Amino acid sequence: MTDPTFEDLARRPGVERRETVHEVGPDAFADTRTDIDAGLTWAVGGVVTDAHGRILLVKEGGRWLAPGGEVEAGESHAEALVREVREETGVDATVEDPVAATEVTFVDAESDDEVSFYFAHYTATATTTALTDDPGLADEGIERVVWADEVPAETVDRDVIVANSPAEPL
């Protein structure tokens, strides 16, 4: 499947165009560059809600975030999101609309080198709600998955999640 271009996705009605820049140390920069060189162009995250108005969140590295991850070769954004949500949480979901397209840039704090990839948030509705007891894959650091009524302050891309879900800011 062909990924949409960043520009095409960001121009769609209802999609917020965003840019983030993260200054990181050389080791984190090298890891990100390795991922991008290996084919990381797009990653996706799901603003997944259920019939009770709850939002699905994962906790990784001490921060909450929407479930999601890398779009693998041959996958559409929707296929990747369905796979990632299931792998990370055990929940099955139906992908709906794109709501944000972000160009994510990492800058090496020592050399000022830059690498970038794109991240798209989509709304999605859970078709199952049972959470896994073993979140994520073996190489992921997912600590916890929850259905939440409120979005914690330390949530990554919190503004996107709050704007596109019935969950209240905490």
Image (tube, helix red, strand yellow):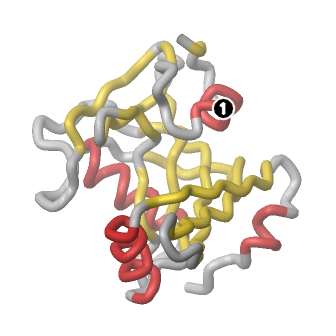
Find numbered disc 1 in the image and state the secondary structure of the residue it sits on.
helix
Q: Indicate the position of residue 15 as horizontal and vertical percent values.
A: 79, 51
Q: Indicate the position of residue 93 as horizontal and vertical percent values.
A: 43, 46
Q: Indicate the position of residue 96 as horizontal and vertical percent values.
A: 62, 49
Instruction: Report whether 24 appears left or right of 143.
Output: right
Residue at the far front in the pictured view: 110
Q: Nearer the viewer, residue 91 or 62?
A: 62
Amino acid at dot 1: Asp
In the displayed structure, would residue 25 be above or below residue 91?
below
**Which residue is at a point 69% across and 77% down the rendered structure image?**
4
**Which residue is at a point 56% across and 67% down the rendered structure image?**
107
In the displayed structure, would residue 25 be above or below residue 93?
below
Q: Which residue is mark 1?
A: 159
Instruction: Report whether 10 appears left or right of 110.
Output: right
**Which residue is at a point 28% across and 42% down the rendered structure image?**
89
**Which residue is at a point 88% across and 53% down the rendered structure image?**
13
Instruction: Report whether 102 appears left or right of 111.
Output: right
